Image: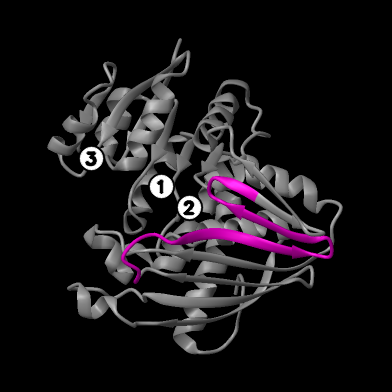
Amino acid sequence: MALQIGIIGTGWFSKVHADILSNMDGVQVAAFVGTSQEKAARAVQGYASAKAYSNTEQMLDETKPDAVYICVPPFAHGEIESQLVQRGIPFLVEKPLGTNLATPRQILHGVKKAGLMTSAGYHFRYTDAAMKAAEMLESRKIGMALGYWMGDMPQVYWWRQQEGSGGQFIEQTTHMVDLLRCLLGEVDEVYAAFAHRAMKDIHEGVTVHDVGTVTLKLKSGAVATISNTCMLPESDMVGLAIYTEQGVIDIQPDKLIVKEKGRLTEIRNAANPYLRENEAFIHGLRTGDASGILSTYEDAVKTMEVTYAALRSAESGVPVKVGE
C-alpha cells in the first residue's frame, strides 16, 4: 500500500516536494490544500492521484493521509499543526515555524506529548557542503563564523509585512542561523541592530527591516556575526564562513570552499538536498527509524529561539539571552 501524502500550500515549495514524492516508489501525493479551491485545483494538475481542497479538516477527513507536508507562509502556522497533532499525523514543515515563539512552543508541547515524527525544512543541513564541513570541523578548533544572506526583497505581499513574514532574519536568514547551530553548537546570547534604509520608500506597505546584523555568543565560547539585507536589486551572497586555526571553511548554497595554507579547494554539491530531506522523512515513516532526519520540529524551535531573540534585541537595543 502506497504512503498517502497530503500537501498544505500551493506555492513553489509545495511543488518541489510534490515532484520529488511523486517520483518515489510506494508514495502518492494524495491531496493539495490551497487558500482557495481554484489554487488547489491548479496545484493538483500533473499529479494524477491528487485531489484539491480548500479546507484542511476536510482533506484530513476524506484523504486520511499517512503524513502531511506544510508549505505555508510564516503567519499561517498554528491551526494546521494543531489539527495534525490532535489526529497523530506526522508532518514535514517548511521554515520558519511562525512569526513569533508562542505558536511553535505550543505546537512543540503537543508534538512531544503525541510522540509524533516530524521534520523541518532546513535543507542546507542535507547538502554535501554542510556534511563535509561537519566532518572537517571535528579535527579543527572553531574560533568564529561570519554568515550572510544578501539579496532582494521577495515580491509576495506578506513577506514585506512584519506580521506576515517575521522579517528577513526570521524568514530567510534562519537557514544560516540553523547551519551555525548545526555546526558550531547552541547560541547563548545575541545582540542585533536592524534598520529601515530604502525599501519603505520603494515599495508600498513595507514594515520589515531591510538591513540587519546580529552578533552571537555561543555556549562553546566561539562568536559569530550574521548579517542580511533585502534592499539589493538582485541576490548577491548567501553563506556561512567558519574560521579555524587551520583555515577557513566557507559553506555556500552550491559548494564548499576550503582555504588552508595557501591552498583553495572547492567541493561542489553533487546530491540534491531536497531529495535527501524527503528520503529521510519517508524512510522514517516506513520504518520508524528517524535517524536520517537532520532537523526535527523540536530542533527547529531552537533555531526559532535564536532568530526571535535577535528581533527582540533589535527592537529593544539590548542583548537578549536565547530561550528567555
Residue lying farthest front?
262
Image coordinates of residue 195 in percent, x first then y, are: 40, 83
Q: Which residue is mark 3?
A: 34
Image coordinates of residue 3 in percent, x first then y, are: 45, 19
Which type of secondary structure does the marked residue at label 3 adopt? Answer: loop
Q: Which residue is mark 2?
A: 107
Q: Which residue is mark 1?
A: 82
User: Against 74, is 286 above or below?
Assistant: above
The image quarter containing residue 36 is top left
The image quarter containing residue 230 is bottom left
User: Against 210, is 28 above or below?
Assistant: above
Which type of secondary structure does the marked residue at label 2 adopt? Answer: helix
Q: Earlier in the sequence, mark 2 or mark 1?
A: 1
Q: Is residue 100 visible?
A: no
- Residue sitting at x 38%, y 35%: 16
Colouring convention used in this rendered image of the protein: one colour
Residue 233 is a magenta residue: yes
Give the main secondary structure, helix, strand or loop, of the magenta stretch.
strand
The image quarter containing residue 21 is top left
Q: Are marks 3 and 1 in contact (CB under 8 Å)?
A: no
User: Against 210, is 89 above or below?
Assistant: above
Image coordinates of residue 74 in percent, x first then y, are: 36, 57
- Residue sitting at x 57%, y 21%: 286
